Amino acid sequence: AQSVTQLDSQVPVFEEAPVELRCNYSSSVSVYLFWYVQYPNQGLQLLLKYLSGSTLVKGINGFEAEFNKSQTSFHLRKPSVHISDTAEYFCAVSDRDSSYKLIFGSGTRLLVRP
Amino acid sequence: GAGVSQSPSNKVTEKGKDVELRCDPISGHTALYWYRQSLGQGLEFLIYFQGNSAPDKSGLPSDRFSAERTGGSVSTLTIQRTQQEDSAVYLCATGLGSSYNSPLHFGNGTRLTVT
């Protein structure tokens, strides 16, 4: 069965600094990978996804993520964060063997300070 | 158009009582998920409905939890004999098809408090 590990429960960072949120997955077959974001007092929304092709995927609000099959990782990055990026970020995985059900990690709270 | 609607938005119940949580999906969405969100626990998968296929119930934590989806539309999550550890936000999410070709749309959740 697939699983997702987000090792960092909280990442504090200063405004305009770069950030990387880590995500590692476990699956025995080809996977689809996602990042969802939950802004304060809002529902979750899709940030970006990797299905196939280029391993570097770009999402909304200047975020990008890189799929690394050998390291089973899908880390999320942004070169310069804003206060408005403060939110909870969830990595998720699905695969064919699990009928594409979406399994989420425990989340990483990004806290951007001025 | 309307998004995923969940009701009630808040529910306070006494330990041992049964509760029913409702999810109205976006029209035409064949995939429907229930997740539980607890502080520090992230999004815990509970159950997954996809079209007319048998639901994937592998995430239900105990036999006190059950869910049904009538006519491929509205879904109800039932928790029997509630316990304090059931306190959490219960999220419903729906999608047009499989997760890889259609993003999930989340409801605002039902916050369940068991006293």
Image (tube, rainbow, N blue to C red):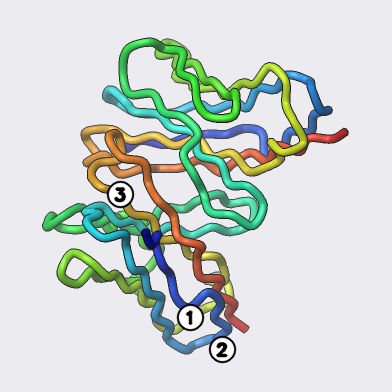
Q: Residue at point 34% right, 56% down? A: B33
Distance between mark 2 and mark 1 Cα atoms: 8 Å
Query: Separation of disc 2 and disc 3 at Cα?
Result: 33 Å
- Residue beneath disc 2: B14
Percent x, y for residue B111? 56, 71
Q: Amino acid at mark 2?
A: Glu
Q: Residues within 10 Å of mark 2 (few under 14, many from 20)?
A: some
Residue A28 location (% of width, % of height): 30, 26
Q: Nearer the viewer, mark 3 or mark 1?
A: 3
Location of the N terminus of chain B by quadrant is bottom left
Residue at the image point whose x is 49% and y is 20% from the top: A58
What residue sits right under mark 3 in the picture?
B95
The quarter of the displayed image where residue A83 is located: top right
Sequence-wise first label, 2 or 1: 2
Disc nearer the start of the sequence (3/1): 1
Chain that bears disc 2: B
Identify residue type, mark 1: Thr
Q: Earlier in the sequence, mark 2 or mark 3?
A: 2
Residue B20 percent across, percent down from the top left: 39, 80
- Asked if residue B68 lies left or right of residue A62, the reply is left
Work out whether disc 2 and disc 3 sit on a shared chain. Answer: yes
Label disc, if present, on residue A12 of the rendered structure: none
Q: Specify the subunit that label 1 lies on.
A: B
Which of pointers 2 and 3 indicates the residue nearer the eye?
3
Residue plotted at (26% across, 39% down)? A100
Residue at the spot of label 1 = B82
- Dividing the picture into quadrants, the one containing residue B5 is bottom left
